[in-house]
Amino acid sequence: MDLGAFDYQPRTRLVFGPGTLARVGELARDVGGKRVLVVTDPGIAGAGYPAQAMALIEEAGMVAQVFAEVHENPTTVDVDHCVAAAREFGADLIIGLGGGSSMDTAKGCNFILTNGGRMQDYWGVNKASQPMLPMIAIPTTAGTGSECQSFALISDAETHVKMACGDYRAAAKVAILDAELTVSQPHRVTVCTGIDALSHALESAVTTKRNAWSAMYSREAFRLCHSGFNRVLREPENVEARGQMLLGAAYAGIAIENSMLGAAHSCANPLTAFFNVVHGEAVGVMLPHVIRFNAALPEVAAIYESYHDGDLADRVTEMLREAQMPTNIGHYGVKEANLPELAAMAAKQWTAQFNPRSISEADFVALYRAAL
């Protein structure tokens, strides 16, 4: 596959290592914050990490407040609530602490807080006109790679359409990658986010926007996630293995930022919208079928072969089984009659245009049918 031109501008400082949450006060001070809003979800708040971050921030001479009302797959309503909290507090720095949902909500809040309007106004790329507040991203899951991306994925609360709102100004100034924060994840969160990270590495490796820079990160992301995933399943408290997954997810995020995603993510979003399938499961259950579909292109098949010695689609299915995740969409109640509606929505997804093999609505029906 031809490696396209690229223009990469590093925007996010990566601070990696066990215990690096302890540096949050110093790093917040470095980027110029005085009133810090920590955006997170109730589960993470219950684990105590936001309270730790607040204490460290206040020790460094700043004022902090926690907004802990983020929901999974955040909508425009979640963002609006976060904006109201940020305005009332007078935030001048935002921290997204948690999974991709917390980081996406923090970014979405930043768009509206600094540029006004509604989230729908920023659907697309570089639609903000004013600078944004500095942001620090602290992932507690090894999955989305949102800490290394300038996109916020926010669903329209009325239409349920997932909007990708991207702007270079929205990228985090700093990402703190502390694997110790991921140890407390429930098993299901670990496997769902891990499969998501793996899918990011594999999809970004073959998109039409793939280039020499993204390919480097896609490959290393896959190596780290493929190795770390089974180690984490066997040894959930192994911080080194958790670190492999966390760094792999971040590298996959960098790859996405430079090469986008493909049809597996296009297939996943309708499953989430219509059947409430968790994103990582939705991507995972479709990924083997998309790999086979794309492997019809010899150049894509060659990339897959270089990633894994054997049938890559079978290996992904094997990993799903090892993680005790569903391997068919019938498990979620999907019937043959649902396929046209799912396919129609999948064909409209933004990522479909970057799939290496051109894909039609009929092709999406076939992919869903293969996954039944």
Image (cartoon, rainbow, N blue to C red):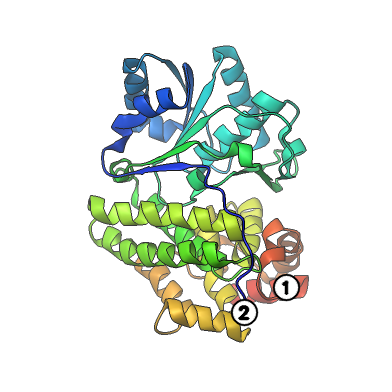
Q: Which mark is residue 293?
A: 2
Residue to which mark 1 is pinned: 359
Disc 1, SS:
loop
Q: Residue at x 71, y 41 (%)?
A: 156
Which of 193 and 168 lies nearest the eye of the viewer?
Answer: 168
Mark yes or no: residue 363 visible.
yes
Q: Residue at x 32, y 20 (%)?
A: 55
Disc 2, SS:
helix
Give the residue type at disc 1.
Answer: Ile
Q: Quadrant of residue 355?
A: bottom right
Upstream in the sequence, badge 1 or badge 2? 2
Q: Residue at x 44, y 76 (%)?
A: 307
Quarter containing the C terminus: bottom right
In the image, residue 365 above or below residue 81: below
Give the residue type at disc 2.
Answer: Phe
Determine the CA span between mark 1 and mark 2.
9 Å
Q: Residue 165 placed where, x, y %?
A: 67, 43
Badge 2: few (under 14), some or many (20 or more) residues near its Cα, within 10 Å? Answer: some
Horizontal relation, residue 134 to residue 238: left or right: right
Q: Residue 288 placed where, x, y %?
A: 52, 74
Q: Residue 77 placed where, x, y %?
A: 65, 31
Horizontal relation, residue 199 to residue 188: left or right: right
Are the residues at dot 1 and dot 2 in contact (C-beta closer than 8 Å)? yes
